[in-house]
């Protein structure tokens, strides 16, 4: 198993349960990959994946299996958005009503294009819309400026990318997973989280994995033949395996030395890179404050911010922007300036986050495809190649880009590998 993120750990658990001997090689000094609960700003904060929901079947099965407690952030009492340079305030409900017409029109064709959300390529004509960016489709609506910017900011929050780079089909896939309801899609992706942090999920799966797990072990090279593979680690160790599960994110898979090389579809997707290249920032402000939600537009370094934790004398906000190159989570002054777009009354005490785009073991945040990537590459990304199998949330069927997708992919790949090895079903 190359990688001890959620997909790798789930695949390890399933394969061990089938009686196979599993070795997990993880490059970082910790497990979890793009989920990482770290103690910062006085709280356990999620640097990566955070929110989950009962409409996400694979992650919810894990919540049930391990009896994990689920909680949520404070309900926002006030919303802020922009109309040109003017800041508008209202209730969250009023904001939702503002974006509702745009959301409905944009997503009207969801179930036509994705009649079976867990099989995104089920509709043979999907390529007809896969070439559009979400920006193309938003522009077609010719919304009034206030509605346009509010919708745009909401989509930047979902895409973590410049909207001209993000495939319209990614927006459709998220919404199809909630049977066409954008409200439910919105809730599924941004409200409920694990009370014990994603660490509680990672620890539970790892404890159950029944595998030997080695951290700080980067795999640099794979040589594979018809009935075995040899992995070479960064330290020069050579490890033989009958089968290998590769869980590297799309953006770095092409950097792994593989002989014979991976198929063209996998390499092309890796070279093109995902659309997502954004930033997630945690901001501690002096309290007490009322919980709020704020949306700007794609033009601002932070497009979305909201209160996630409330203390007696402080509060912690979480914010997202489309481009990690435009703002560093550790640059307190820049983050303070970005917040002033809506509010100049907040006293910023400290900020933090993780730069996933510079992280050599991810170089992406959560998967959002570029136009044509799903129809061109998804099949190739999922396909095994000889003794090599591939698991990643990045190419999951249903909730690709989510924790749920990592679990789905780990389960699917473990079943596929075990079937090859033992003929078992
Ligand atoms: C900022 C951010 C916010 C997110 N928010 C949410 C959210 O709210 N809800 C949600 O459901 N999802 C969210 N996600 C997405 C979710 O976290 C990921 O989709 C999921 O965790 C990916 O799991 P994975 O196992 O497929 O990949 P990864 O977690 O990337 O696992 C791959 C593993 O492989 C390791 N690795 C890489 N290269 C090597 C190598 N050469 N040798 C050995 N090991 C290697 C990596 O270190 C990593 O541990 C977010 C992600 C980010 C970054």
Image: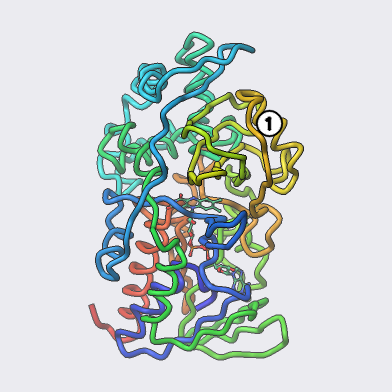
Q: Secondary structure at mark 1?
A: helix
Q: Residue 185's quadrant in the figure?
A: top left
Q: Is residue 52 visible?
A: yes
Residue 231 rendering spot, x and y as whole percentages: 61, 84
For the point 62% across and 54% down, which residue is it? 41
As drawn, 315 above or below 4:
above
As drawn, 287 above or below 337:
below
Q: How many marks?
A: 1
Residue 273 rendering spot, x and y as whole percentages: 62, 49
For the point 39% across and 68% down, which residue is it? 410
Q: Residues within 10 Å of mark 1 (few under 14, many from 20)?
A: some
Which quadrant of the rendered structure holds the C terminus?
A: bottom left
For the point 39% across and 74% down, which residue is it? 205
Circle 1 is placed at which residue position? 338
For the point 45% across and 56% down, which residue is it? 395
Residue 55 rendering spot, x and y as whole percentages: 27, 48
């Amino acid at each position: 198993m190359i990688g001890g993120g959620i997909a790798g750990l789930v695949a390890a658990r399933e394969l061990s349960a089938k009686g196979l001997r599993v070795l997990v090689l993880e490059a970082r000094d910790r497990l979890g990959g793009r989920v990482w609960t770290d103690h910062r700003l006085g709280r356990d904060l999620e640097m990566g994946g955070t929110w989950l929901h009962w409409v996400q079947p694979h992650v919810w099965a894990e919540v049930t299996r391990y009896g994990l407690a689920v909680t949520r952030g404070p309900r926002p009492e006030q919303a802020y958005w922009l109309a040109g340079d003017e800041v508008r305030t209202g209730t969250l409900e009023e904001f939702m009503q503002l974006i509702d017409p745009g959301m409905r029109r944009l997503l009207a064709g969801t179930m036509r294009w994705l009649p079976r959300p867990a099989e995104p390529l089920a509709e043979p004509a999907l390529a007809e819309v896969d070439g559009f960016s979400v920006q193309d489709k938003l522009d077609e609506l010719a919304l009034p400026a206030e509605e346009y910017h509010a919708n745009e900011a909401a989509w930047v929050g979902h895409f973590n990318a410049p909207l001209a780079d993000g495939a319209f089909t990614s927006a459709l896939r998220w919404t199809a997973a909630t049977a066409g309801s954008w409200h439910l899609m919105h809730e599924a992706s941004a409200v409920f989280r694990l009370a014990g942090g994603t660490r509680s999920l990672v620890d539970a799966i790892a404890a159950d994995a029944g595998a030997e797990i080695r951290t700080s072990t980067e795999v640099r090279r794979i040589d594979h033949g018809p009935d075995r593979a040899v992995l070479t680690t960064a330290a020069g160790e050579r490890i033989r395996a009958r089968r290998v599960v590769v869980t590297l994110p799309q953006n770095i898979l092409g950097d792994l030395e593989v002989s014979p090389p991976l198929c063209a579809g996998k390499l092309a997707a890796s070279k093109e890179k995902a659309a997502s290249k954004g930033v997630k920032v945690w901001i501690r402000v002096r309290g007490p404050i009322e919980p709020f939600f704020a949306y700007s537009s794609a033009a601002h370094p932070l497009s979305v911010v909201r209160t996630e934790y409330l203390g007696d004398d402080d509060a912690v906000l979480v914010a997202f922007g489309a481009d990690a190159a435009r703002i560093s989570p550790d640059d307190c002054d820049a983050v303070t300036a970005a917040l002033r777009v809506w509010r100049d009354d907040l006293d910023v005490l400290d900020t933090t986050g993780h730069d996933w785009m510079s992280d050599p073991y991810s170089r992406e945040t959560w998967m959002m495809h570029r136009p044509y990537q799903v129809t061109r590459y998804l099949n190739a990304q999922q396909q095994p190649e000889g003794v090599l199998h591939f698991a990643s949330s990045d190419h999951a069927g249903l909730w690709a880009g989510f924790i749920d997708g990592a679990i789905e992919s780990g389960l699917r790949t473990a079943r596929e590998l075990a079937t090859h090895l033992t003929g078992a079903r």
